Amino acid sequence: MHNDHLQKLEPALYVVATPIGNLRDITLRAMEVLSNADVVAAEDTRNTAHLLSHHAIRAKQLVAVHQHNERGAAEKMVAQIQGGASIAFVSDAGTPAVSDPGALLVQAVLAAGLRVIPIPGPSAAVAALSTSGLNDAHFLFYGFLPNKSAARRTALQTLQDHPYTLVFYEAPHRIVECVNDLCAVLGGERQIVLAREITKLFETIHSCRLSEAAAWLQSDSNQQRGEFVVLVSAAQAQTGIPNEAQRTLSVLLAELPLKQAVQLAVQITGIGRKELYQLALQLKGEEE
Ligand code: SAM
């Protein structure tokens, strides 16, 4: 980093997002804050030292703050910020406090009436979502499901009717089990997107029906390696109208005005006009 970026930072906790693989995915502002902060607090100092040296950034002071000492570290940081220090916090990858340490620090700093400043950047969930091709109007970020299958299925049952794209993080050694549970609880019809090794050499974004996902993963053990974001398309509203009739109506709606689409759908499917009209309104609403 060049000297012209040197500046005194306002005393605060800076929550800095870092790359999720490709080390070049770091913002100019993140680099400035990491260079100029009085302290860089990192989940894993070795990992952060690697990132800093890649960008020729020399941190003034690099300290470790992880899950196990976050509470104690928070007290110390509050005192340091009160004394005028600027502290940058980074997790191992992506955005801190998103399925990562950071939330306790932020809470403590806010509770002391001090400033917390976001330095936004990569997050695996958002990167996966933006390239998934799923276009539900809303998404629900769940993060990690429980490790054990029974608990995982129970957690999934609470999500099964939500009309939102579901976004999970999963470890490679559980990916097949997880996909099997997703299929068992959510049904095989929904679309799944497996976003693996985003921004890295073996980046793969694979989309298929839930019922096909386990076989696809098992057909090539390389597809079970690395880091995963798993996305599942939203639950369809329970209308009591068979899927095939719903599909017919959506196809007609894409081509025709609502009234005409409903009229034709009634003739094709034999389902009542009132029900199809309701569904058409709903489908149109979801599009907007
Ligand atoms: N705070 C991070 C973020 O903002 O994305 C997430 C940290 S969490 C401990 C790590 C999990 O994020 C991994 O197990 C994986 O599910 C997901 N992840 C992180 N990097 C990824 C990548 N490059 N490709 C796919 N998933 C990734």
Image: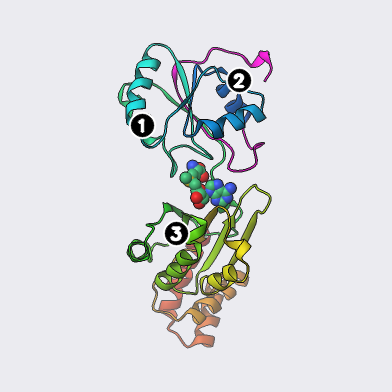
Q: Residue furthest left?
A: 111
Separation of marks 2 and 3 at Cα, in angstroms:
43 Å
Residue 35 horizontal/vertical position (percent) = 58, 20
Residue under pointer 2: 58
Taking depth in this image into account, of 154 and 202 the one nearest to the observer is 202
Name the image colouring.
rainbow
Magenta highlight on residue 7: yes
Does residue 123 lie above or below 168 as drawn?
Answer: above
Amino acid under label 1?
Asn
Which element carries disc 2, helix, strand or loop? loop
Hey, which quadrant is residue 100 in on the image?
A: top left
Residue under pointer 3: 164
Residue 23 horizontal/vertical position (percent) = 64, 37
Q: Which secondary structure class fits the magenta region best?
A: loop
Residue 59 horizontal/vertical position (percent) = 56, 20
Residue under pointer 1: 69
Tell me the magenta residue range: 1-26
Q: Is mark 2 within 8 Å of ligand 1?
A: no
* Residue at image coords 61%, 14%: 6
